[in-house]
Image (cartoon, helix red, strand yellow):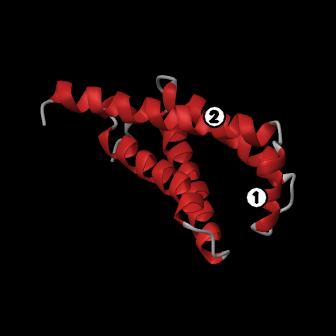
Amino acid sequence: MSEKTKKIAYWFFTLWLSLGMVSTAIVQLIKLPEEVEKINQLGYPTYFLTLLGVWKLLGVAAVLVPKFVLLKEWAYAGFFFAMSGAAISHIASGHGFGEIFPSVLLLVLTTISWYLRPENRRTKS
């Protein structure tokens, strides 16, 4: 994969990830009744929606803004933990594929975006 193709793919997947995180964060922050019901079905308190929503917005800002490479790593880790936790919670609660898929999709987008990130967005070993 050429550097140009890799850069285009990175931004495609990163923007898709960011859109998904921002849209779910907004739904969580305004506490749509469906979201409140869903989070309570999973066994989590309603205030957890506020925490997730704020963390997602901060994570998107960290991933998109230039520099702050270590902060980006933490944001990607947070996305990974939140989305894998959501998928596992849905599976453990016996939810169907339609409930599990959004979390898995955001988990896959997180992984792809992290993997394709340019050199200037990586921590130095």
Residue with the mark numbered 2: 23
Disc assigned to residue 12 = none
Say what amino acid the circle numbered 1 marks: Lys
Residue with the mark numbered 1: 38
Is 115 left or right of 1, judged from the image as shown? right
Is 19 left or right of 121, judged from the image as shown? right
- The one of 123 and 12 positioned closer to us in this rendering: 12
Sequence-earlier tag: 2 or 1? 2
Q: Is residue 58 visible?
A: no
Q: Quadrant of residue 57?
A: top right
Where is 50 relative to 43, above or below? above
Q: Nearer the viewer, mark 2 or mark 1?
A: 1
Residue plotted at (87% across, 52% down): 47
**Secondary structure beneath disc 2?**
helix
Q: Is residue 50 visible?
A: yes
Say what amino acid the circle numbered 2 marks: Ser
Q: Residue furthest left?
A: 2
Quadrant of the snapshot with the N terminus: top left
**Crowding at mark 1 (Cα within 10 Å: few <14, some 14-19, many 20+):** some
Is 116 left or right of 15, judged from the image as shown? left
Where is residue 51? Give x, y as percent: 78, 47
**Secondary structure beneath disc 1?**
helix
Residue plotted at (38% across, 36% down): 13
Where is residue 108? Give x, y as percent: 41, 52
Where is 75 relative to 69, above or below? below
Residue plotted at (80% across, 69% down): 43
